Image (cartoon, rainbow, N blue to C red):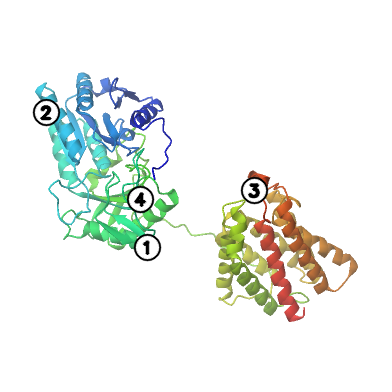
Amino acid sequence: MTSKKLLNSVEGCADDSLAGFVACNPDLQLLQGHRVALRSDLDSLKGRVALLSGGGSGHEPAHAGFIGKGMLTGVIAGSVFASPAVGSILAAIRAVDQAGTAGILLIVKNYTGDRLNFGFAMEQAKAEGIPVEMVIIGDDSAFTVLKKAGRRGLCGTILIHKVAGALAEEGVGLEEIAKRVNAIAKAMGTLGVSLSSCSVPGSKPTFELADDELELGLGIHGEAGVRRIKRAPVDQIVTLMLDHMTNTSNVSHVPVESGSSVILIVNNLGGLSFLELGIIAEATIRLLEDRGVQVARALVGTFMSALEMPGVSLTLMLVDEPMLKLIDADTTATAWPHLAKVPVTRRKRIRTAPREPSAVPEATAVGGVAPKQMMLVLERVCTTLTGLEKHLNALDRAAGDGDCGTTHSRAAKAILDWLKEDPALDSPAQVLSKLSVLLLERMGGSSGALYGLFLTAAAQPLKTKTDLPAWSAAMDAGLEAMMKYGKAEPGDRTMVDSLWAVKQELQAWKSTGASFLPVLTKAVENAEAAAMATKNMEAGAGRASYISSARLDQPDPGAVAIATIFRAILEVLQTQGA
């Protein structure tokens, strides 16, 4: 099945994309009649070496994102995943030469089409008397046996753009830059892994993977890799990648070993979330440091993509202090990240958290819920919520992101883990405060914050008394705090509806003096009825308020969860004869 993409036309997508990038960047210009982007200030390069690069489109922000002072002078773009035309390459060379530059270096990734077309243009330019040199970058570390075509050019190429650009800014000559770049390129390697393929506009995906498979050692044009591996935690995948990249029996390995200092690039191949990139970056830095490798600089983001491919590549380049000076040199290229000019390794990453204030002695459970009952109540609530996970998720999919059950189950597991530590449960106020912290830290989302607010406020009336009227006051305080900050009121189709039903019954109980268990039984029944009634309500708060009421034909999952919690509490107290 052909993938969907937002285009004007398949034929014009490369032109439209480059034109859009230039339209947003006043420092760039298009070369008329060609798919070429150049610095607007070419005249400022008079007497210095210019740098041209390029290749197929579909690798954005490469290549145009790396045009700027301190990096590339211009780029020549081909169609998606296709080498640029010889005529456009030659036109770019001529335009830059006419600005009075002191020679032109072509930085070309090692692909047959790019070698041929850039090489042909270079020979023609030299025949016209233009000083031009070309370096071919191959940083692929996938192949254990070197192919005749050599290593493919991958994300490591942008480091060459940066180093060569810094040398050109220093006024270094063309031949010297080419010589140094060729030496540097031998000290880096790149390896990619992907969850699935990408698809060229108008075409189907280039390969298929099973749900439990990943592709290792693939390029940046949707081509398959060198092997398929089973899906595994990120630590295992990164370990496999680093082992492959640095294995000395691999002819395309990068010579990184204990004591080495490297620059690391964690490059999004197009379809990974920033969440995943962060996980991969942390694992890679930690695992490199475990091997004794010093990470001098780390670049994390999208630098050289393969359209929408959901994968990542890791690039390692050996560096020393002179090399770091070139990497740290200023550039105006928009896709080059702002890097701190200090090593990643050996930097203190953890700040000690402030100590919590000393606890003030609080009332113990005299006349209220005893520690044993508290333990039983919490265990019953947690096991009930864990069993309700799928049902709450199903209810939440109609009005939210389908994770209400998961968040409640996560909270339940956090509480159960805490209970295994055999905590003191004789102070209800301290128990509610601890639960508040647990849910804020472990439950997450708006639910965690709302429960945290409720429990923090509910703990206050229980600091001095723990009798039944104090528990009723705790209910009032918790609900007031939740409504104040959550902005939900009864009738808004939220968990407040169930809580409000319990509150109303408890208020009536305080004035009648009836036995507590019958009152709680009635309160739970009212909470369950209130939860069911939410399916007929117009959502007035929360994520569901953005959804058409026609789609809301199930009860609110938060309200159902609250009613379930109180039902679990009631069942324990009934069993204990409270």
Q: Nearer the viewer, residue 344 or 269?
A: 269
Q: What amino acid type should be assigned to the residue bearing mark 1?
A: Ala
Relative image position of residue 317 (x, y in whole percent): 24, 49
The label shown at residue 467 is none
The label shown at residue 232 is 1
Callout 3 environment at 10 Å: few (<14), some (14 to 19), or many (20+)? Answer: few
What residue is disc 2 on? Answer: 123
Circle 1: element type? loop
Callout 2 environment at 10 Å: few (<14), some (14 to 19), or many (20+)? Answer: some
How far is the residue under mark 4 from the one under mark 1? 14 Å
Relative image position of residue 188 (x, y in whole percent): 22, 49
What residue is disc 4 on? Answer: 311
Q: What amino acid type should be assigned to the residue bearing mark 2?
A: Glu
What residue is disc 3 on? Answer: 551
Q: Which of pointers 3 and 4 lies earlier in the amino acid sequence?
A: 4
Q: Which of pointers 1 and 2 lies earlier in the amino acid sequence?
A: 2
Q: Nearer the viewer, residue 182 or 58?
A: 58
Circle 4: element type? strand
How far is the residue under mark 2 from the one under mark 3? 66 Å
